[in-house]
Image: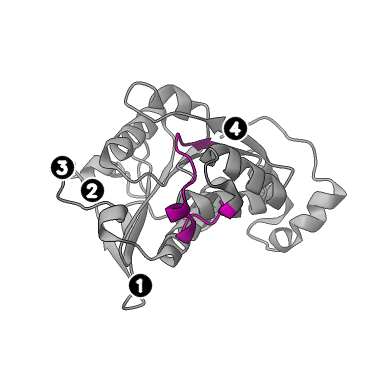
């Protein structure tokens, strides 16, 4: 975590975050942790939109956004950080404007690039943790490997049609029993063959589903920053929207 001390919460911030501060689990100390945190969000799309909006509203001090796309009309059904007037704009610039409308206290850093094995480690090392809302396996593996190598917690999620999943990865740490936590590659040893998993454009997706899963991602990030609760380490939370059912699958490193 970033150990530099931010300025004390001012009167406006105390009022803005009052509902956090009255929670004994968060309080003023937890809000200060949020204020000094640096979180990198991969993608300003369906998952990234609620992650960014709720983290900005929560008072996370610095949000980095990685995206190299522009806003299109078909994005607006689920990417609620953008609006009709943003069509044709860079998703980065559209997201930044939206976040500053939500909370002008938040610093937004724009990374106009596509992450790869080559550039991911250096970028990720400059943040405290990562929330991955990417939509392809190449980026997911590059992000997960870089987070593992740099010792950065990763909140990973994926969505498709009516289903979503989320987990937290900290393979550089051990659990309460002294056993090494699993990695992304323990959960998904290799990417599926090309064309086996259809994209959202091919298979479709309900827009509200990305809101459910992205908001859960934001909650896991807040838990990690403030040190409260039990993050989804070694657990994959599965959501079936049609059945309105959550299930949890445990996973671990192979023996």
Which of disc 1 and disc 2 is earlier in sequence?
2
Which of disc 1 and disc 3 is earlier in sequence?
3
SS under mark 1: loop
**Which residue does the image show at 32% across and 57% down from the upper left?**
235
- Say whether residue 155 is magenta: no
Judge whether 68 appears above or below 97 on screen: above
Specify few, some or many for label 3: CA neighbours under 10 Å numbering under 14, 14-19, or 20 or more.
Answer: few
- Which image quadrant is residue 84 in? bottom right
Q: CA distance from mark 2 to mark 3?
A: 19 Å
Pinpoint residue 195: horizontal percent, then vertical percent.
Answer: 16, 47
Pinpoint residue 226: horizontal percent, then vertical percent.
Answer: 59, 49
Q: Which residues are magenta?
A: 64-84
* Number of the front mark, 2 or 3: 3
Q: Nearer the viewer, residue 97 or 212?
A: 97
**Which residue does the image show at 29% across and 43% down from the upper left?**
136
Report the residue marked by disc 3: 194
Q: How is the image coloured?
A: one colour
Report the residue marked by disc 1: 241
**Which residue does the image show at 59% across and 38% down from the upper left?**
93
Pinpoint residue 126: horizontal percent, then vertical percent.
Answer: 52, 26
Q: CA distance from mark 2 to mark 1?
A: 22 Å
Report the residue marked by disc 4: 109
27 horizontally vs 15: left or right: left
SS under mark 3: loop
């Amino acid at each position: 975590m970033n150990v530099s001390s931010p300025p004390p919460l001012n009167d406006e911030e105390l009022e803005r975050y009052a509902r956090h501060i009255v929670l004994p689990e968060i309080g003023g100390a937890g809000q200060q942790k949020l204020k000094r945190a640096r979180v990198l969000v991969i993608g300003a799309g369906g998952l990234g939109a609620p992650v960014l909006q709720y983290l900005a509203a929560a008072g996370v001090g610095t949000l980095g956004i990685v995206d190299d796309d522009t806003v299109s009309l078909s994005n607006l059904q689920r990417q609620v950080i953008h609006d009709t007037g943003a069509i044709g704009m860079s998703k980065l610039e559209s997201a930044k404007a939206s976040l500053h409308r939500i909370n002008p206290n938040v610093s937004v850093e724009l990374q106009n690039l596509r992450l790869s094995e080559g550039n991911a480690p250096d970028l990720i090392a400059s943040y405290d943790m990562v929330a991955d809302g990417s939509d392809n396996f190449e980026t997911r593996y590059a992000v997960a490997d870089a987070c593992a190598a740099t010792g950065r917690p990763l909140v990973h999620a994926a969505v498709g049609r009516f289903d979503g999943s989320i987990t937290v990865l900290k393979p550089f740490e051990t659990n309460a029993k002294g056993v090494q936590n699993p990695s992304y590659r323990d959960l998904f040893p290799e990417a599926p063959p090309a064309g086996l998993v259809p994209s959202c454009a091919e298979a479709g997706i309900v827009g509200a589903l990305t809101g459910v899963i992205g908001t859960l991602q934001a909650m896991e990030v807040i838990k990690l920053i403030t040190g409260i609760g039990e993050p989804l380490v070694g657990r994959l939370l599965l959501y079936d929207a049609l059945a309105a059912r959550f299930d949890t699958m445990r996973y671990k490193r192979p023996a």
